[in-house]
Image (tube, rainbow, N blue to C red):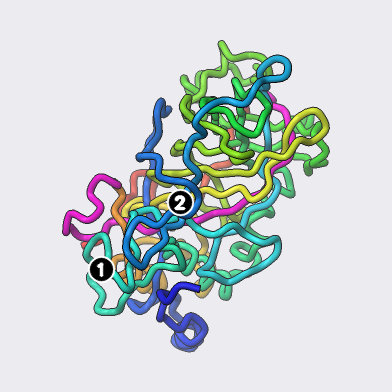
Amino acid sequence: MLPWRRNVGIAGVVALMVAACSLYDSSLLLPVSPGSDAGMDGGAQPTVADGAVSMDAGCTHSVAPSAPAKDDTSVGPDRDFVVAASYFRVVAGATATLPPSPSGLDLDNTCTCPGPPSCTGTSSKATCDLDGGADDNGGVFFAQYALLDPTGFSDMGLSTAVTAGSNGLLYRVKNYNGQPNDTKVTVIAYESSGIRDADGGTLAPLLDGTDVWSIAPNSLLGGDSVDGGASCEGNDTACLPVFFDTNAYVSNGTLVAHVDHPFFVGYQISRIRVLLAGSVLSARLIPSGGSFRIDDGRISGRWSTTAFLTALQSLNDPLQAGVGLCGDAGTYLNIKAGVCGFADVMTDHTKDNTGVACDAFSMQVTFTGVPAHLGPVAAEGKLRTPCGATYEDRCP
Protein backbone atom coordinates (compact mmCIF):
# COMPACT_ATOMS: atom_id res chain seq x y z
CA MET A 1 0.00 0.00 0.00
CA LEU A 2 1.49 3.34 -1.01
CA PRO A 3 1.52 6.17 1.54
CA TRP A 4 -0.55 8.81 -0.26
CA ARG A 5 -4.29 8.84 0.33
CA ARG A 6 -7.02 11.45 0.66
CA ASN A 7 -7.22 13.23 3.99
CA VAL A 8 -10.83 14.48 3.90
CA GLY A 9 -13.36 12.95 6.34
CA ILE A 10 -16.29 12.15 4.05
CA ALA A 11 -18.78 10.89 6.64
CA GLY A 12 -18.20 13.82 8.96
CA VAL A 13 -18.53 16.36 6.19
CA VAL A 14 -21.78 14.87 4.91
CA ALA A 15 -23.25 14.77 8.41
CA LEU A 16 -22.54 18.46 8.83
CA MET A 17 -24.01 19.23 5.42
CA VAL A 18 -27.27 17.43 6.15
CA ALA A 19 -27.60 19.13 9.53
CA ALA A 20 -27.21 22.51 7.87
CA CYS A 21 -29.65 21.58 5.06
CA SER A 22 -27.00 22.17 2.46
CA LEU A 23 -25.24 19.70 0.21
CA TYR A 24 -21.61 20.67 -0.27
CA ASP A 25 -19.16 23.17 1.10
CA SER A 26 -15.61 24.09 0.20
CA SER A 27 -14.21 21.17 2.17
CA LEU A 28 -15.31 18.64 -0.43
CA LEU A 29 -13.80 17.00 -3.43
CA LEU A 30 -15.65 16.57 -6.73
CA PRO A 31 -15.39 15.44 -10.44
CA VAL A 32 -15.09 17.28 -13.77
CA SER A 33 -14.08 17.43 -17.53
CA PRO A 34 -15.72 17.90 -20.96
CA GLY A 35 -15.14 15.80 -23.98
CA SER A 36 -14.77 16.26 -27.67
CA ASP A 37 -17.82 15.99 -29.89
CA ALA A 38 -15.84 14.48 -32.71
CA GLY A 39 -14.46 11.09 -33.62
CA MET A 40 -10.90 10.32 -32.70
CA ASP A 41 -8.30 8.79 -34.97
CA GLY A 42 -5.30 8.23 -32.82
CA GLY A 43 -6.18 8.82 -29.19
CA ALA A 44 -6.86 11.62 -26.78
CA GLN A 45 -3.52 11.45 -25.02
CA PRO A 46 -0.21 9.60 -25.29
CA THR A 47 -0.20 5.89 -24.57
CA VAL A 48 1.70 5.14 -21.40
CA ALA A 49 3.58 2.07 -20.29
CA ASP A 50 2.26 -1.32 -19.15
CA GLY A 51 -0.28 -1.60 -16.34
CA ALA A 52 1.88 -0.24 -13.52
CA VAL A 53 5.37 0.98 -14.38
CA SER A 54 7.74 2.93 -12.17
CA MET A 55 8.29 6.35 -13.73
CA ASP A 56 9.35 8.47 -10.76
CA ALA A 57 11.46 7.66 -7.76
CA GLY A 58 9.15 6.35 -5.03
CA CYS A 59 6.04 6.30 -7.22
CA THR A 60 4.65 3.50 -9.35
CA HIS A 61 2.05 4.97 -11.68
CA SER A 62 -1.21 3.16 -12.39
CA VAL A 63 -1.61 3.29 -16.17
CA ALA A 64 -3.29 1.37 -18.99
CA PRO A 65 -1.45 -1.47 -20.72
CA SER A 66 0.64 -0.40 -23.69
CA ALA A 67 0.09 -1.77 -27.20
CA PRO A 68 1.57 -5.21 -27.88
CA ALA A 69 4.72 -5.47 -29.98
CA LYS A 70 2.99 -7.61 -32.60
CA ASP A 71 -0.28 -9.32 -33.47
CA ASP A 72 -1.06 -12.86 -32.46
CA THR A 73 -1.78 -15.18 -35.37
CA SER A 74 -5.42 -14.88 -36.44
CA VAL A 75 -7.73 -17.87 -36.64
CA GLY A 76 -10.43 -17.08 -39.18
CA PRO A 77 -11.75 -13.65 -40.21
CA ASP A 78 -11.52 -10.51 -38.08
CA ARG A 79 -14.22 -10.09 -35.47
CA ASP A 80 -16.88 -7.35 -35.41
CA PHE A 81 -19.04 -7.36 -32.28
CA VAL A 82 -21.07 -5.12 -29.95
CA VAL A 83 -21.27 -5.06 -26.16
CA ALA A 84 -23.79 -3.17 -24.02
CA ALA A 85 -22.99 -1.91 -20.54
CA SER A 86 -24.89 -3.96 -17.97
CA TYR A 87 -23.65 -2.36 -14.75
CA PHE A 88 -22.06 0.98 -13.79
CA ARG A 89 -20.10 1.97 -10.73
CA VAL A 90 -18.42 5.29 -10.03
CA VAL A 91 -15.21 4.53 -8.16
CA ALA A 92 -15.37 6.39 -4.85
CA GLY A 93 -11.89 6.68 -3.41
CA ALA A 94 -10.50 3.25 -2.69
CA THR A 95 -13.68 1.93 -1.11
CA ALA A 96 -14.37 -1.60 -2.30
CA THR A 97 -17.92 -2.57 -3.24
CA LEU A 98 -19.24 -5.42 -5.30
CA PRO A 99 -18.50 -6.21 -8.01
CA PRO A 100 -14.78 -5.61 -7.43
CA SER A 101 -13.36 -2.71 -9.38
CA PRO A 102 -10.02 -2.40 -11.15
CA SER A 103 -7.81 0.32 -9.75
CA GLY A 104 -8.09 3.84 -11.14
CA LEU A 105 -5.62 5.38 -13.57
CA ASP A 106 -3.06 8.12 -13.04
CA LEU A 107 -4.40 10.62 -15.57
CA ASP A 108 -1.81 13.38 -15.10
CA ASN A 109 1.35 11.27 -14.71
CA THR A 110 1.80 12.80 -11.25
CA CYS A 111 1.73 11.26 -7.78
CA THR A 112 0.31 14.09 -5.66
CA CYS A 113 1.37 13.51 -2.04
CA PRO A 114 4.25 13.11 -1.57
CA GLY A 115 4.85 15.06 -4.80
CA PRO A 116 3.28 18.39 -5.81
CA PRO A 117 -0.01 18.47 -7.78
CA SER A 118 -0.07 18.78 -11.57
CA CYS A 119 -2.03 22.06 -11.40
CA THR A 120 -2.76 24.68 -8.77
CA GLY A 121 -5.92 24.72 -6.70
CA THR A 122 -7.64 27.35 -4.57
CA SER A 123 -7.99 25.21 -1.43
CA SER A 124 -5.41 25.08 1.34
CA LYS A 125 -6.21 21.40 1.88
CA ALA A 126 -4.16 18.78 0.09
CA THR A 127 -5.97 16.75 -2.56
CA CYS A 128 -3.89 13.60 -2.47
CA ASP A 129 -3.99 10.95 -5.18
CA LEU A 130 -4.93 7.36 -4.50
CA ASP A 131 -2.43 4.53 -4.72
CA GLY A 132 -0.40 4.58 -7.92
CA GLY A 133 -1.13 8.28 -8.41
CA ALA A 134 -4.73 7.43 -9.42
CA ASP A 135 -6.90 10.54 -9.83
CA ASP A 136 -10.50 10.28 -8.62
CA ASN A 137 -12.01 13.44 -7.14
CA GLY A 138 -15.20 12.73 -9.09
CA GLY A 139 -15.86 9.59 -7.10
CA VAL A 140 -15.91 11.59 -3.89
CA PHE A 141 -18.79 13.73 -5.18
CA PHE A 142 -20.86 10.73 -6.17
CA ALA A 143 -20.17 8.94 -2.87
CA GLN A 144 -21.34 11.97 -0.90
CA TYR A 145 -24.34 12.74 -3.11
CA ALA A 146 -25.44 9.09 -2.82
CA LEU A 147 -25.97 9.60 0.91
CA LEU A 148 -28.61 12.23 0.14
CA ASP A 149 -29.98 10.62 -3.02
CA PRO A 150 -29.38 6.86 -2.69
CA THR A 151 -31.96 5.97 -5.35
CA GLY A 152 -30.00 7.81 -8.02
CA PHE A 153 -26.35 7.61 -7.07
CA SER A 154 -25.86 4.34 -5.27
CA ASP A 155 -24.27 1.56 -7.33
CA MET A 156 -27.77 0.24 -8.04
CA GLY A 157 -29.14 3.69 -8.85
CA LEU A 158 -26.40 4.47 -11.35
CA SER A 159 -27.30 1.32 -13.27
CA THR A 160 -31.08 1.63 -13.06
CA ALA A 161 -31.47 3.16 -16.53
CA VAL A 162 -29.52 0.26 -18.02
CA THR A 163 -31.39 -2.45 -16.14
CA ALA A 164 -34.71 -0.80 -17.08
CA GLY A 165 -33.68 -0.54 -20.74
CA SER A 166 -34.30 3.23 -20.87
CA ASN A 167 -30.73 4.38 -21.57
CA GLY A 168 -27.55 2.55 -22.40
CA LEU A 169 -23.95 2.63 -23.55
CA LEU A 170 -22.69 0.47 -26.41
CA TYR A 171 -19.21 -0.28 -27.69
CA ARG A 172 -18.58 -1.80 -31.10
CA VAL A 173 -15.20 -3.46 -31.72
CA LYS A 174 -14.14 -3.94 -35.35
CA ASN A 175 -11.14 -5.42 -37.14
CA TYR A 176 -10.20 -7.55 -34.12
CA ASN A 177 -8.29 -10.77 -34.70
CA GLY A 178 -9.99 -12.43 -31.73
CA GLN A 179 -6.69 -13.22 -30.05
CA PRO A 180 -5.09 -11.90 -26.81
CA ASN A 181 -2.93 -9.42 -28.75
CA ASP A 182 -3.95 -7.19 -31.64
CA THR A 183 -1.95 -4.05 -32.37
CA LYS A 184 -4.78 -2.14 -34.05
CA VAL A 185 -8.56 -2.40 -33.74
CA THR A 186 -11.41 0.09 -34.10
CA VAL A 187 -13.65 0.98 -31.16
CA ILE A 188 -16.91 2.92 -31.66
CA ALA A 189 -19.00 4.28 -28.77
CA TYR A 190 -22.77 4.82 -28.98
CA GLU A 191 -25.12 6.39 -26.49
CA SER A 192 -28.37 4.41 -26.54
CA SER A 193 -31.95 5.58 -26.06
CA GLY A 194 -32.85 2.18 -24.67
CA ILE A 195 -34.54 -0.97 -25.92
CA ARG A 196 -37.76 0.03 -27.70
CA ASP A 197 -40.91 -1.97 -28.09
CA ALA A 198 -43.34 -1.70 -31.01
CA ASP A 199 -45.25 1.14 -29.30
CA GLY A 200 -42.16 3.23 -28.55
CA GLY A 201 -41.92 2.18 -24.90
CA THR A 202 -38.87 0.59 -23.33
CA LEU A 203 -38.13 -3.01 -22.43
CA ALA A 204 -35.77 -4.35 -19.79
CA PRO A 205 -32.76 -6.11 -21.32
CA LEU A 206 -32.39 -9.88 -21.12
CA LEU A 207 -28.57 -9.53 -21.05
CA ASP A 208 -28.28 -12.81 -22.96
CA GLY A 209 -26.78 -11.52 -26.21
CA THR A 210 -30.12 -11.02 -27.96
CA ASP A 211 -30.90 -7.45 -26.81
CA VAL A 212 -31.31 -4.87 -29.58
CA TRP A 213 -30.43 -1.39 -28.29
CA SER A 214 -31.51 1.76 -30.11
CA ILE A 215 -28.89 4.36 -31.08
CA ALA A 216 -29.18 7.98 -29.91
CA PRO A 217 -28.92 10.47 -32.81
CA ASN A 218 -26.12 12.43 -31.10
CA SER A 219 -23.84 9.41 -31.62
CA LEU A 220 -24.22 9.58 -35.42
CA LEU A 221 -23.10 12.01 -38.07
CA GLY A 222 -26.19 13.93 -39.12
CA GLY A 223 -27.73 13.65 -35.66
CA ASP A 224 -31.51 14.10 -35.70
CA SER A 225 -31.56 14.05 -39.51
CA VAL A 226 -30.66 10.34 -39.58
CA ASP A 227 -33.62 8.16 -40.60
CA GLY A 228 -35.36 7.17 -37.38
CA GLY A 229 -36.53 3.90 -38.84
CA ALA A 230 -33.11 2.74 -39.95
CA SER A 231 -31.42 -0.05 -38.03
CA CYS A 232 -27.71 0.44 -37.46
CA GLU A 233 -27.00 -3.28 -37.50
CA GLY A 234 -25.05 -3.84 -40.71
CA ASN A 235 -25.92 -0.34 -41.91
CA ASP A 236 -22.64 1.56 -41.70
CA THR A 237 -23.60 3.90 -44.54
CA ALA A 238 -26.60 5.36 -42.71
CA CYS A 239 -25.10 5.14 -39.21
CA LEU A 240 -21.72 6.85 -39.43
CA PRO A 241 -20.36 7.21 -35.90
CA VAL A 242 -19.21 10.39 -34.16
CA PHE A 243 -17.21 8.83 -31.31
CA PHE A 244 -14.48 6.37 -32.31
CA ASP A 245 -10.80 5.41 -32.13
CA THR A 246 -9.26 3.61 -35.10
CA ASN A 247 -5.98 3.08 -33.23
CA ALA A 248 -7.29 1.07 -30.31
CA TYR A 249 -5.60 -2.22 -29.45
CA VAL A 250 -5.84 -5.40 -27.39
CA SER A 251 -2.96 -6.28 -25.07
CA ASN A 252 -3.00 -9.64 -23.26
CA GLY A 253 -6.77 -9.71 -23.55
CA THR A 254 -7.34 -6.11 -22.41
CA LEU A 255 -8.94 -3.68 -24.85
CA VAL A 256 -7.55 -0.12 -24.68
CA ALA A 257 -9.02 2.86 -26.56
CA HIS A 258 -8.87 6.65 -26.32
CA VAL A 259 -12.26 8.09 -27.20
CA ASP A 260 -14.32 10.88 -25.64
CA HIS A 261 -18.06 10.19 -25.69
CA PRO A 262 -21.11 11.10 -23.59
CA PHE A 263 -23.02 8.64 -21.43
CA PHE A 264 -25.72 8.79 -18.77
CA VAL A 265 -25.50 7.71 -15.16
CA GLY A 266 -28.47 7.77 -12.80
CA TYR A 267 -32.16 7.57 -13.63
CA GLN A 268 -35.05 9.97 -14.26
CA ILE A 269 -34.68 13.05 -11.99
CA SER A 270 -31.28 11.81 -10.80
CA ARG A 271 -29.89 11.39 -14.31
CA ILE A 272 -26.85 13.32 -15.49
CA ARG A 273 -24.91 13.19 -18.75
CA VAL A 274 -21.20 12.59 -18.22
CA LEU A 275 -18.87 14.15 -20.78
CA LEU A 276 -15.19 13.48 -20.18
CA ALA A 277 -12.04 14.66 -21.93
CA GLY A 278 -8.81 12.73 -22.35
CA SER A 279 -10.77 9.52 -21.83
CA VAL A 280 -9.13 6.11 -21.59
CA LEU A 281 -11.25 3.00 -22.03
CA SER A 282 -9.80 -0.26 -20.78
CA ALA A 283 -11.73 -3.51 -20.59
CA ARG A 284 -10.98 -7.20 -20.28
CA LEU A 285 -12.46 -9.13 -23.23
CA ILE A 286 -13.92 -12.55 -22.39
CA PRO A 287 -15.19 -14.95 -25.10
CA SER A 288 -18.94 -15.42 -24.70
CA GLY A 289 -21.28 -17.39 -26.96
CA GLY A 290 -19.42 -16.72 -30.19
CA SER A 291 -18.89 -13.08 -29.25
CA PHE A 292 -17.24 -11.32 -26.31
CA ARG A 293 -18.32 -9.78 -23.04
CA ILE A 294 -16.50 -7.16 -20.96
CA ASP A 295 -15.29 -7.69 -17.43
CA ASP A 296 -13.46 -5.04 -15.39
CA GLY A 297 -14.36 -2.27 -17.82
CA ARG A 298 -13.17 1.19 -16.88
CA ILE A 299 -13.68 4.70 -18.30
CA SER A 300 -11.16 7.20 -16.93
CA GLY A 301 -11.15 10.88 -17.82
CA ARG A 302 -11.44 14.55 -16.89
CA TRP A 303 -14.71 16.43 -16.38
CA SER A 304 -14.30 20.22 -16.70
CA THR A 305 -15.72 22.38 -13.95
CA THR A 306 -17.75 24.35 -16.50
CA ALA A 307 -19.27 21.23 -18.07
CA PHE A 308 -19.97 19.69 -14.67
CA LEU A 309 -21.59 22.77 -13.13
CA THR A 310 -23.74 23.23 -16.23
CA ALA A 311 -24.80 19.56 -16.30
CA LEU A 312 -25.92 19.64 -12.66
CA GLN A 313 -29.16 21.43 -13.59
CA SER A 314 -30.60 18.13 -14.79
CA LEU A 315 -30.53 16.85 -11.19
CA ASN A 316 -33.23 17.50 -8.63
CA ASP A 317 -32.17 19.28 -5.45
CA PRO A 318 -32.46 16.52 -2.80
CA LEU A 319 -33.19 19.08 -0.08
CA GLN A 320 -35.63 21.37 -1.93
CA ALA A 321 -38.43 19.65 -3.83
CA GLY A 322 -38.91 20.82 -7.39
CA VAL A 323 -35.70 22.86 -7.49
CA GLY A 324 -32.92 22.13 -9.95
CA LEU A 325 -29.24 22.24 -9.06
CA CYS A 326 -28.40 25.50 -10.79
CA GLY A 327 -28.64 29.27 -10.55
CA ASP A 328 -29.09 30.75 -7.07
CA ALA A 329 -30.36 27.62 -5.33
CA GLY A 330 -28.67 27.38 -1.94
CA THR A 331 -27.73 23.73 -2.28
CA TYR A 332 -26.25 24.35 -5.72
CA LEU A 333 -24.15 27.30 -4.50
CA ASN A 334 -22.61 25.09 -1.81
CA ILE A 335 -21.81 22.45 -4.43
CA LYS A 336 -20.29 25.09 -6.68
CA ALA A 337 -17.99 26.29 -3.92
CA GLY A 338 -16.72 22.74 -3.49
CA VAL A 339 -16.32 22.20 -7.23
CA CYS A 340 -14.34 25.37 -7.77
CA GLY A 341 -12.16 24.82 -4.72
CA PHE A 342 -11.16 21.21 -5.33
CA ALA A 343 -10.64 20.64 -9.05
CA ASP A 344 -7.59 18.37 -9.27
CA VAL A 345 -6.60 18.13 -12.97
CA MET A 346 -6.63 20.08 -16.23
CA THR A 347 -9.28 19.54 -18.91
CA ASP A 348 -6.51 19.69 -21.51
CA HIS A 349 -3.84 17.13 -20.62
CA THR A 350 -1.18 19.14 -22.46
CA LYS A 351 -1.49 21.76 -19.70
CA ASP A 352 -0.59 19.32 -16.92
CA ASN A 353 2.37 20.48 -14.84
CA THR A 354 2.47 23.93 -16.43
CA GLY A 355 1.64 25.82 -13.22
CA VAL A 356 -1.87 26.92 -14.22
CA ALA A 357 -5.06 26.64 -12.14
CA CYS A 358 -6.90 23.31 -12.17
CA ASP A 359 -10.11 23.44 -14.21
CA ALA A 360 -11.37 19.83 -14.11
CA PHE A 361 -12.10 16.86 -11.88
CA SER A 362 -10.81 13.37 -12.44
CA MET A 363 -13.35 10.58 -12.90
CA GLN A 364 -13.16 6.77 -12.84
CA VAL A 365 -16.26 4.79 -13.90
CA THR A 366 -16.25 0.99 -13.99
CA PHE A 367 -18.69 -1.22 -15.85
CA THR A 368 -19.43 -4.67 -17.14
CA GLY A 369 -20.74 -5.41 -20.64
CA VAL A 370 -22.58 -8.22 -22.41
CA PRO A 371 -23.00 -9.10 -26.10
CA ALA A 372 -25.73 -7.08 -27.80
CA HIS A 373 -26.98 -5.79 -31.16
CA LEU A 374 -27.28 -2.34 -32.70
CA GLY A 375 -30.87 -1.32 -33.28
CA PRO A 376 -32.83 1.54 -34.86
CA VAL A 377 -32.08 5.23 -34.41
CA ALA A 378 -34.33 6.65 -31.68
CA ALA A 379 -34.37 9.98 -29.87
CA GLU A 380 -33.62 9.90 -26.17
CA GLY A 381 -35.61 11.55 -23.40
CA LYS A 382 -34.82 15.19 -22.73
CA LEU A 383 -32.88 16.21 -19.65
CA ARG A 384 -34.38 18.71 -17.22
CA THR A 385 -33.26 22.30 -17.89
CA PRO A 386 -34.82 24.41 -15.11
CA CYS A 387 -32.27 27.19 -15.70
CA GLY A 388 -32.81 27.16 -19.48
CA ALA A 389 -31.48 25.30 -22.50
CA THR A 390 -28.67 27.84 -23.02
CA TYR A 391 -27.68 28.03 -19.35
CA GLU A 392 -23.98 27.67 -18.55
CA ASP A 393 -22.11 28.21 -15.31
CA ARG A 394 -18.41 28.33 -14.55
CA CYS A 395 -16.05 28.92 -11.69
CA PRO A 396 -15.01 32.53 -10.92
* 88 sits left or right of 305 in the view: right
Which span of residues is magenta-colored?
349-377
Is residue 325 visible to us here? Answer: no
Residue 63, disc: 2
Q: Nearer the viewer, residue 61 or 245?
A: 61
Spot occupied by residue 261 in the image (x, y as percentages of width and height): 47, 38
Using the image as rendered, state which of residue 186 and residue 57 is in the foreground.
57
Disc sitting over residue 116 in the figure: 1
Q: Determine which of the numbered discs, if any, sits on residue 83 in the image.
A: none
Q: CA distance from mark 2 to mark 1?
A: 19 Å
> Vertical placement of 383 versus 249: above or below?
below
Callout 1: SS:
loop
Task: Name the side, left or right, on which 286 lies relative to 272.
Answer: right
The main secondary structure of the magenta stretch is strand
Which comes before the other along the chain, label 2 or label 1?
A: 2
Residue for point 59% across, 20% down? 175
Give the vertical position of 89 relative to 86 (above or below): below
From the viewer's perspective, tell me whether residue 250 is left or right of residue 31. Answer: right
Q: Tag 1: residue type?
A: Pro
- Look at the picture and state if 24 lies above or below 151: below
| Residue at point 56%, 11% (across, down) | 237
How many residues crowd mark 2 within 10 Å: few (<14), some (14–19), many (20+)? many
Q: Residue 155, relative to residue 74: is it above or below?
A: below
Q: Position of residue 331 (x, y in %)?
A: 41, 72
Query: Residue 244: x, y in percent?
Result: 48, 28
Badge 2 amino acid: Val
Q: Counting other residues with Cα less than 10 Å from the Cα at mark 1, is it few (<14), some (14-19), or many (20 or more)?
A: some
Image location (x, y in percent) of residue 221: 47, 21
Asked whether 357 falls inside the magenta stretch, the response is yes
Q: Residue at x 31, y 49 (%)?
A: 347
